[in-house]
Amino acid sequence: MTTITVGLLGAGRGLSLAQLFDRVPGYRVVAVCDAIPERLDRARSACPRAEGFHDYAAMLREPFDVMIVASAPPNHADHVCAALEAGKAVLSEVPAAHTIDDAQRIVDTVARTRGYYMLGENCNYYGFIHAWKELLEEGVLGEVIHAEGEYVHDIRGITWVDADGRYYNPADPRCPATARPSWRARYNPIQYITHSLGPLLWLTSDRCTSVSCLSTGCRTQPEIGSPDGQIALFETHSGAPIRQSCIFSAPKEPGGQWYSLYCSRGYAESKRAPWDSGKLYLADGTMKEIQRKDWPTAVDTPLASSGHGGIDGGLVWEFAHAFRRGAPSPIDVHTAMDYTLPGIYAALSAERNGERLHIPDTRTERLVTRF
Ligand SMILES: NC(=O)c1ccc[n+]([C@@H]2O[C@H](COP(=O)([O-])OP(=O)(O)OC[C@H]3O[C@@H](n4cnc5c(N)ncnc54)[C@H](O)[C@@H]3O)[C@@H](O)[C@H]2O)c1
């Protein structure tokens, strides 16, 4: 088996993905890059066979096969396009793009370079999402008539960052005067929609066609700057509306993703907390009331003992095997934009007090910034 070599940009979240690649037979992480010395040192200890780089352009000149792009979302387009131009396959962290122009640039670069691109949407690898897919494919649940997804996570403690990449809440007395707002402090919550929307679109093979979104405003901790949360209602190609809530500055514990499916023959809901359980109701006479369901947390792979309850392992395993076989990307660039553009257009809708906006399909439409 030939060895497939991997590089990593961004040794924050990205480091856990790189360590998983090192556990896949036939894959080896050979290069890691971070501009922050402390993070680069950590990455080199975690991936001892990798050379360390401070400079992304220098790393791109090295002859490896796959680039993990785990920089901040506003830089994904620059970093993804540069990697594709350098002939690397790309596994990009979420969301795929920050702006409409960024999204079109990534789509165009994948097409021109005929590059291999996958969006790293790990939530698609929840075990219960795969269990729901089986129920839908077997016709047990019937037709989906409405779906809901939420990502609620109080991230105020990671909105300010110091020069060594250490995160703080700006209200914390330990936050140094030199700390600055990180990308998360300047982010529209609904643009971080891929975790709560991606699995629903994967389940239903659907896409969002228009959106109306409202914002809470920035009331919990005004110095953070971004809205506390945003709530969007999407029209879909199939006609089943989807509601999404992304809330990142609210004192709710535990945080995490939550999903529900309303179908013509039943209802399924994920658990909201570790002591909760998944739920299923079928209207075929077999269930008189909603039933507790202990669906698996993550899809079963040899990387099951991995981050986020095992879903990171599902993601890396699927990328690694699809890429080695030359199979189509499991979450290709158009699907990545199906997951990402709804958040970008929802944020624009919120700026316009809920005006309903069309969401283009990158397979058939060019994205235009002014509409
Ligand atoms: N899928 C998940 O569960 C999950 C979880 C957390 C974060 N993420 C995503 O992962 C990405 C990274 O998140 P994070 O929390 O690690 O962000 P971060 O800002 O803490 O880390 C990004 C790192 O990239 C480095 N970097 C950026 N540009 C660089 C360049 N040109 N040269 C060298 N180094 C550079 C920075 O120094 C920094 O250390 C984001 O896209 C985020 O949305 C995904």
Image (cartoon, rainbow, N blue to C red):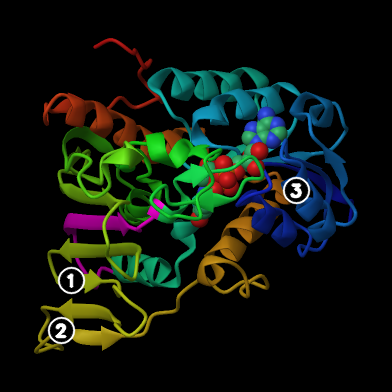
Instruction: Confirm or deny contact between disc 1 and disc 3 (CB under 8 A).
Output: no
Vertical order, 269 against 60 (above or below):
below
The quarter of the picture where the C terminus appears is top left
How packed mark 2 is, by other alpha carbons closer than 10 Å (few <14, some 14-19, many 20 or more), is some
Observer-nearest residue: 106 or 193?
A: 193
The reply to whether residue 214 is visible in this rendering is: yes
The residue tagged 3 is 38
Residue at image position (17%, 79%) is 281
Element class at badge 2: loop
Q: Label 2, label 3: how many angstroms apart (C-alpha)? A: 50 Å
Residue at image position (59%, 50%) is 166
Say what amino acid the circle numbered 3 marks.
Glu
Q: Which residues are magenta?
A: 139-156
Q: Label 1, label 3: how many angstroms apart (C-alpha)? A: 48 Å
Expressed as whole percent of the image width and height from the top left, the position of residue 61 reads 85, 26
Say what amino acid the circle numbered 1 marks.
Tyr
Residue at image position (45%, 58%) is 124
Residue at image position (60%, 38%) is 71
Expressed as whole percent of the image width and height from the top left, the position of residue 256 reads 36, 64
Vertical order, 193 against 125 (above or below):
above
Residue 339 image-quadrant placement: top left
Element class at badge 1: strand
Residue 53 is left or right of residue 346, and the answer is right
Q: Earlier in the sequence, mark 2 or mark 3?
A: 3
The reply to whether residue 331 is visible in this rendering is: no
